[in-house]
Amino acid sequence: MFTNDKVQTFLDDAVQSKICKPSLPKEFVVTVAIPEEAGSLHGFQILKLETPGRISRMKVVVDNDSISLQTVNVLEYSFEAPAEWQGLPLVTDGINLGIPRKETALLGFKQNGQWQVSLAQAKAFLAHDSTR
């Protein structure tokens, strides 16, 4: 069935084009009730809740200038930037946490109500997470 030259040409073109490479969404929401039972979405994972037992949300909006997060009941999250988002500053609840380095995970956490970032803790988390 796929020995037809027209079909083969179409399939070859599709593999090389964006038909088979969907782009990442520019806006999405990560919603979690129990972080231990949830995975990541487009590189974002909620790790800890401010108030356990209540739902948490992280709205992500990506534009040409930044990756902006608005959080509800999130105490800690991890982020690994997909290739097409690398180089964009990460802004969490209005606080610029800087530009994640290529292929580096980061861990955002609230301390005294202020968002901060830790690369070392993220590496430790990812090492622990990969052993599951």
Image: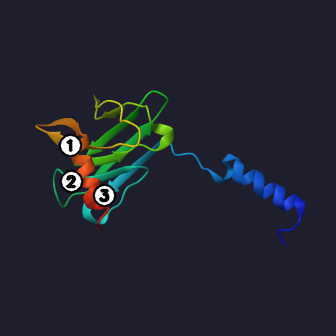
Where disc 1 sits, the SS reads strand
**Mark 3 or mark 2, earlier in chain:** 3
> Dividing the image into 4 quarters, which one contains the C terminus?
bottom left
Horizontal side, residue 27 vs residue 128: left or right:
right
How far across and how far down the image is residue 126, in percent? 29, 54
How far across and down, in percent of the image, does residue 72 sit? 26, 46
Q: CA distance from mark 1 to mark 2?
A: 9 Å
How does the figure colour the protein chain or chains?
rainbow
**Which SS class for mark 2?**
strand
Quadrant where the N terminus sits is bottom right
> Closer to the observer: label 3 or label 2?
2
Alpha-carbon distance for marks 1 and 3?
16 Å
Specify the amino acid type for callout 3: Val
Q: Residue at x 28, y 35 (%)?
A: 93
Q: Report how many numbered discs are placed on residues in the image.
A: 3
Q: Nearer the viewer, residue 72 or 48?
A: 48
Say which residue label 3 marks: 32
Mark 1 or mark 3: name the one nearer the start of the chain. 3
Q: Which mark is residue 60?
A: none
Quick check: 120 left or right of 15? left
- For the residue labelled by badge 3, is the local secondary structure a helix, a strand or a loop? strand
Where does label 1 land, which residue? 109
Up-down relation of residue 110 to residue 2 (above or below): above
Q: Quadrant of residue 130?
A: bottom left
Residue position for label 2: 48
Q: Name the amino acid, label 2.
A: Lys
